[in-house]
Amino acid sequence: MSPASMIEQAFAQRRDIRQRINAAIAKSPELSSLFEAIAQHVNDLQPDSSQLHTAALPEHPSKKRKLDPPPGGSSDWGNGTFHSFNDISFSIPQRKKLKLDIGNSPKQGIRGRNAAGDVETSVEWRDIREIMCLPVPEKAQAQHNLCVFAAASDGSSSNQMLWTVPDISPKEGSLSGGATAAPGETYRSLLISAINKSLKIYKKRVVEPSDTEFTSQLAQAHRKGETAYHIKAFRGAKDGFLFLLSTGIIWGFKKPLEFFPFDVIESVSYTSVLQRTFNLNIAMRKDANSDVQEFEFSMIDQADFAGIDAYIKKHGLQDASMAEQRRAKKVNVNGVEAEDVHQAGDEAEGELEKAAREAQDLEDEDEEEDENFDPGSEGQSEGEGDSSEEDELGNGPVNREDDMVDEELGSEAENDE
């Protein structure tokens, strides 16, 4: 078989590749042997090259080959009912509008389908580790992000989902399946109700921010008067938001999300404490055999310091020596109660309190120096610089010792008379 025929057979369905190969050989004839070897290898991999050569396949496929659907995307959903929400904006794992399905069966879960009905992302209820509903900061119209952290199919890493819903009642035609909205219900309330119902068997629920955990003291420019639960910060050059929740700390909303449950946090400390901002450092360890990882979140406004400090102390996160107690609490090994953890954290001054105290001391010292500063005393020795009202009026300093001498001489003169 000639080299040209071999290349023709190997790339029978890709005329564009054949044309590029022929052009390359015409320009650089020394590449002919290389392309011949590649074509021979491709032909060897094909079980029946004659069938592939005559198959009625388009030479320029208009669509990419679809990947196999994720687990739980077909058979597990066939016999169960589910709620469907149309045209939901997903950000993770990809930015795309999909139909969101919330399954009712324990073997189902959450999935996103495209317009053709193909599953593009899904997760089973049993694999979900955490799911949160968080307000989207800095938006003129109220929105909520639903964040899902689940075990990957191999169990080695985290599988994430994130989609956004407006804080309004669903429009007509936006619900299907078993989903119905009563008057006053919103996307948020419908989703939380459906998800919590299915997660109940696994003793889990959707976590939301709470006033008892943390609220920001900063005024919200976009929605004035509304309580804010986020902390604006930077991780490197990437900006984002921290949320202090009852189950841990989450960083979002750019891919990938980061979640720090209490049982993996070794300690929390402050660095770069300045007059207006500070940095928050979270040291975490996935398990006892893993190395400690440091996550630094910078440029946090000092106005939120007190609220963050109270949250860290409440959950005993300021001391690395309490990390084992937090891990034991999750698996209930030693029966450690929350009160015991809090009591241990109150016995010693943590890194957060220490940093706050030092920053306040520095600020007090600066204010004291400003109050005691006398511009007229610069360059004078101790004891100098005092002046009377006469000095201020321009009559010069008064020598008290000379006055005493004059008084004595005056008294002697009177006695002589």
Image: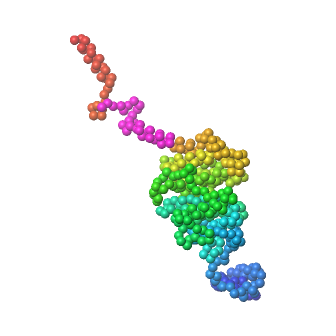
Q: Nearer the viewer, residue 104 or 50?
A: 104
> Horizontal and vertical percent for residue 144?
55, 62
Q: Nearer the viewer, residue 337 or 180?
A: 180
Residue 67 at least partly seen: yes
Residue 279 at least partly seen: no
The quadrant holding residue 94 is: bottom right
Q: Residue at x 75, y 81 (%)?
A: 46
| On-image quarter of the N terminus | bottom right
> Horizontal and vertical percent for residue 340?
65, 43
Q: Residue at x 72, y 83 (%)?
A: 10
The quadrant holding residue 66 is: bottom right
Examine the structure image and report whether residue 376 is included in the region drawn in magenta: yes
| On-image quarter of the C terminus | top left
Q: Nearer the viewer, residue 359 or 377?
A: 359
Q: Residue at x 26, y 17 (%)?
A: 410
The magenta segment is 360-389
| Lateral position of residue 40 relative to residue 86, left or right | right
